[in-house]
Amino acid sequence: MDETFGLIETVEKAAQIYMLTAHLPRINTITDAQMVELAEYFGVGYRKDFLNI
């Protein structure tokens, strides 16, 4: 039960943060080349057709 309530609290906090920031403009501060570097460094797969490389 403790884990369930902990998860619910986490979701509630995430929703609150979203509601506080949803109206703000989203500015991408990372370049596609940097995203590729990060993905390769951490061994994460990514969709190459989403990036402008």
Image (cartoon, rainbow, N blue to C red):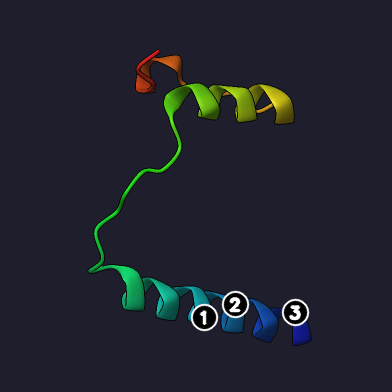
Left or right of residue 37, residue 22 in this image: left
**Side of 48 where 40 appears, left or right:** right
Q: Which residue is mark 2?
A: 10
Pick the residue in front: 16 or 29: 29
Residue for point 29% across, 53% down? 26
Quadrant placement of the C terminus? top left
Question: In whole angstroms, how far apart are the C-alphas of marks 2 and 3?
Answer: 10 Å
Q: Residue shown at 33%/71% (left/top)?
A: 21
Where disc 3 sits, the SS reads: helix
Residue denoted by label 1: 13
Callout 2: few (<14), some (14-19), or many (20+) C-alpha neighbours within 10 Å? few
Quadrant showing the N terminus: bottom right
Instruction: Report which residue position mark 3 lands on.
Output: 3
Q: Mark 1 is on which residue type? A: Lys
Residue 40 picture quarter: top right
Tag 2 near tag 1, CB within 8 Å: yes
Residue 1 shows in the view = no
Name the secondary structure under disc 2: helix
Separation of marks 2 and 1 at Cα, in angstroms:
5 Å
Amino acid beneath label 3 = Glu
Relative image position of residue 22 (x, y in whole percent): 29, 68
